[in-house]
Amino acid sequence: MAYTVESISLRLLTINNFKGSPMVQVDLYVSLLDEILGNRNKNFYDIFDVFVRNTVSGKVNVVVARMTISKLISKLRRISDVLAIDLCQITLERLPRNYLFDEHIADVIQLNASIVERHGFAKEAAVTLATLPFDKASSYNTVPFRFDMYVKIASLFLEADDVGQAEVYIKRAAKLESKITALQSTISYRMYYARILERRHKFVEAAEYYKDLSSITHVSLPVLQRAIVCTILSPVCQERSMLLAQLHQDNRIKNLLAHDIIEKMHLKIVVKRPELQEFETLLQEHHKAIMTDGISVFDRAIIEHNVMACDKICDIISFEALAAISETPTDVTELVASKMIAEGRLEGHIGE
């Protein structure tokens, strides 16, 4: 049988005029769709387009049209990704933007995004999901749905290293968190919020999120390890001191890397560079980022701690001595200490 736009249009016209059961009519449309998907000749995309346009044209009973499109989407989930992505695009272009097909539009967008994500294009997947009609009232567009989608979009932007957009969507989720009861949804949200805070170098806040998450049995130790890293990288402040005390009292950290650094920092003992080798294996690239003043996040945290530790044992110390203790250049140590004094995080003054 020749599959042309004309021949398919004629067959669709016949099914459109079917006077029997709506369920049988749906079966007739689906049977024709199976034929179309199984015969991919040069007119394939045009024929598929005709099928979708006919289904949503208003010539077909609304109930039948909705059921047929649902069956079509199910079939798109089972064909090759290369083909499905093109057919998703055609379907999205033809589906009317009204409440009758909002759920179908959302399904196709999610299918499209999952295919793109599966092939390693996280940002493109995030951008695709962001086109979901979140502002429309419909049966699917519930608070839990929007919450999970916002978290998913944030996670994809984070994977694509677009921290700014990740933060935008995690904050949208934050506005809905109080209405969410599903534990796994709240865990995912809190985990990604912590990771975004970490990438923003808001280490104290991130450590607090991770520490709270560590009370959940099946995620406890990995997030507790991240809490240790973020606490060590945190700037000297009262919140950091509280975190150090809480972690130091937690017996679980004895089984984790860098627990000895937590102990030294809690007890305000100077940390030497050779003692940090194990801890450095836990660092990711953003932990080592060089800031605008030319000092890395990691170096600043260690220098700040050592400056504070020295402040507890002597009233007068030269920058050269501080630098020798921290094993960092004098000018770098002076810059960090001066900033701490200026911000009121360290008592002292710079002598002549």
Image (cartoon, grey):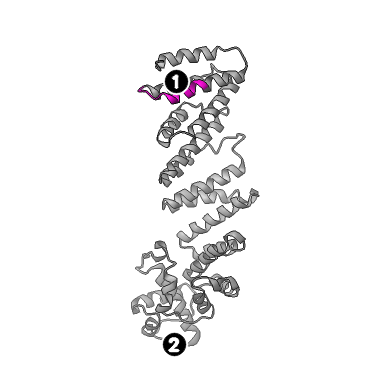
Q: Residue furthest front?
A: 1
Q: Is residue 37 magenta?
A: yes
Residue 28 located left or right of residue 183:
left
Q: Looking at the image, which is closer to me, 159 or 297?
A: 159
Asked if 262 appears above or below 145 in the picture, the reply is below
Residue sitting at 59 percent across and 18 percent down?
24
Image quadrant occupied by the C terminus: bottom left
Which residue in the structure is indicated by mark 1? Answer: 50
Segment colored magenta: 31-42
Residue 226 lies, in percent from the top left, at: 51, 64
What type is the residue that disc 2 sits on? Ile
- Observer-side mark, 1 or 2, equals 1
Nearer the N terminus, badge 1 or badge 2?
A: 1
Q: Looking at the image, which is closer to me, 255 or 302?
A: 255
Q: Label 1: how many residues lie within 10 Å, few (<14), some (14-19) or many (20+)? A: some
Asked if 206 appears above or below 30 in the picture, the reply is below
Image quadrant occupied by the N terminus: top left
Q: Is residue 124 magenta?
A: no
Which residue in the structure is indicated by mark 2? Answer: 316
What type is the residue that disc 1 sits on? Val
* Residue 156 shows in this picture: yes
